[in-house]
Image: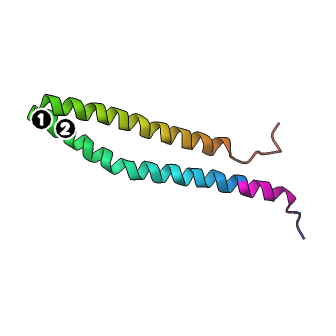
Amino acid sequence: MPDDSKSGSGSIRDAIRWGLFLATVATFGFRLTPLVRDFRSWRTAVRVGDASEADGLRTYLAADTISLLIVLGLGLALFFVLRPRNTSQP
């Protein structure tokens, strides 16, 4: 019978790791479609020449893009920080 004493804490850590990764991907995917739609609206406003709408949409796009990149960066960073430690390496 194999000794599962080490795999108990690893499985919880792996579950948290993959759960955070899936939450990150879901958040990114959920927010990406409206971001693309708003980008197209901004491009249309720029082509039409509506400066006030284009400026407002640009500000919104910048804030939304930065927040989306922060979520993605934190999620990936936590995914790699919580990876299993290899005991064979010093």
In the shown orientation, is residue 3 left or right of residue 43?
right
User: Toward which corner of the image does residue 77 lie, by quadrant?
Assistant: top right
Q: Label 2 amino acid?
A: Arg
In this picture, residue 26 sits left or right of residue 32: right
Q: Give neighbour class at mark 2: few <14, some 14-19, many 20+ (Cα, 10 Å).
A: some
- Dot 2 and dot 1 residues touching (CB under 8 Å): yes
Mark 2, residue position: 43
Q: Position of residue 53 (x, y in %)?
A: 17, 34
> Which range is magenta?
4-12
Q: Which residue shows up at 24% across the image and 35% down it?
A: 57
Horizontal and vertical percent position of residue 79? 61, 45
* Cα–Cα gap, marks 2 and 1: 6 Å
Mark 1 residue element: helix
Instruction: Confirm whether the magenta stretch covers residue 11.
Output: yes
Colour scheme: rainbow
Residue name at image x 55 percent, y 43 percent: 75
